[in-house]
Image (tube, rainbow, N blue to C red):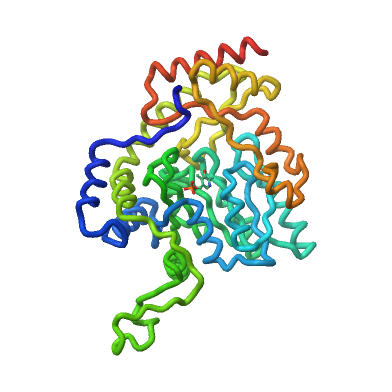
Amino acid sequence: MIPYSCQDIDSTDIEAVTQVLASDFLTQGAQVPAFERALARRVQAREAIAVNSGTSALHLACLALSVGPGDRVWTSPISFVASANCARYCGAEVDFVDIDPRTGNLHLEALERRLADAALDGCLPKVLIPVHYAGQSCDMRVIARLVNPYGVRIIEDASHALGADYEDTPVGCGRYSDITVFSFHPVKMITCGEGGALLTNSLELAESARLLRSHGVTRDPARVDNLEAEPWRYEQHALGFNYRMTDLQAALGLSQLARLDAFLAERRQRARRYQRAFEGTPVSTLHQLTEAHSAWHLMSVLVPAGIRAEVFRRLRQDGIGVNVHYLPIYRQPYYQQLGFPPGYCPRAEAFYQSELSIPLHTRLSDSDQALVIERLLHHVEALT
Ligand SMILES: *Cc1c(COP(=O)(O)O)cnc(C)c1O
């Protein structure tokens, strides 16, 4: 099976992890801070906090922004469930804003209307979590302009978008948001095995996330009482978690980050080939904003809704590992139990009915890509 995505591990990655295995520190050593510095430099943010998953990063981002019971968090229905679950972990209510089917990202007019209605009803969200679907940044300048008058904070879920840019600055630089979150799961742009990070320009938010990453415990002399007389002391100042990244993961992340530009070039070249191949066919590719350059985490295409399921089945039979991203989050049984009706976001539903994610990764060979193109066009033609 040609996978829709897969990691790219080479001998430098293996060497980096092996060196840590033979060192004194498997966790809480020098690799995590080194990875954090490299990440912050890469995306032009002041602070980076590495954690054990993108999901943990989203949870800490919500907590750093004081999301709690009685608060509301809005996100996109076309995302992985973690984009919504993070608010539920904090006891907050989640709601979904419909998407623009041309990009899979939040629909700007829908957001504008929902904000105006919520302001009238006194139920504005505390936080909005835009998701950079498939690796293309949302139109963050507009989103920030829409939410700022209402005091809504922004967490960018950039799990798909490490290496992407928007208005000539890297996603993660925080120009239009409070916190940006990345995931380093093996299908994402770079991998740590499992891993994630929060990026922010706020020292206060960074400090809060760092504290909560490790049990809410600190050894900071400025915060711990009586440290001179009792130098072994640490203090717990909040109810935190063990969301720490290991040094093995950070070493892999550092090594992978050095390869990010090469990964981006490989993905962009393949994405362009797909775009050209599907021009003038019933297979459409996502609209790309002129001010954004996608990281191309996913090659998401839309086919006529009536044949999508059959095209999926036939491609899988051909050994092509297609996938669908995503069933709208509110249609998951857990969210149905919370009362979201089917059809809640009509554009997201329509997008879900047409979407197929076809193989796109750095190890996809030219001949395998040619096969994907030929088989997809063949099945679509036969079925329409
Ligand atoms: C992968 C992903 C996450 C979660 O990241 P993990 O590292 O797997 O916890 C969150 N949001 C989106 C959009 C993702 O694709």
- Toward the viewer: 383 or 136? 383
* Above or below: residue 235 compared with residue 71: below
**Residue 67 placement, left or right of 40:** right
Q: Position of residue 27 (x, y in %)?
A: 31, 59
Q: Position of residue 68 (x, y in %)?
A: 62, 66
- Toward the viewer: 20 or 379? 20
**Where, by quadrant of the figure, is residue 146 drawn?**
bottom right
Q: Residue furthest right?
A: 121
- Toward the viewer: 71 or 149? 71
Q: Position of residue 364 (x, y in %)?
A: 39, 25
The quadrant of the rendering that contains the C terminus is: top right
**Residue 210 placement, left or right of 122:** left
Numbered disc total: 0
* Above or below: residue 37 compared with residue 258: below
Q: Residue at x 61, y 15 (%)?
A: 380
**Where, by quadrant of the figure, is residue 315 drawn?**
top right
Q: Residue at x 55, y 66 (%)?
A: 65
**Where, by quadrant of the figure, is residue 382 drawn?**
top right
Q: Residue at x 55, y 29 (%)?
A: 323
**Residue 6 placement, left or right of 9:** right
* Above or below: residue 232 compared with residue 93: below
Q: Position of residue 3 (x, y in %)?
A: 45, 27
The quadrant of the rendering that contains the N terminus is: top left
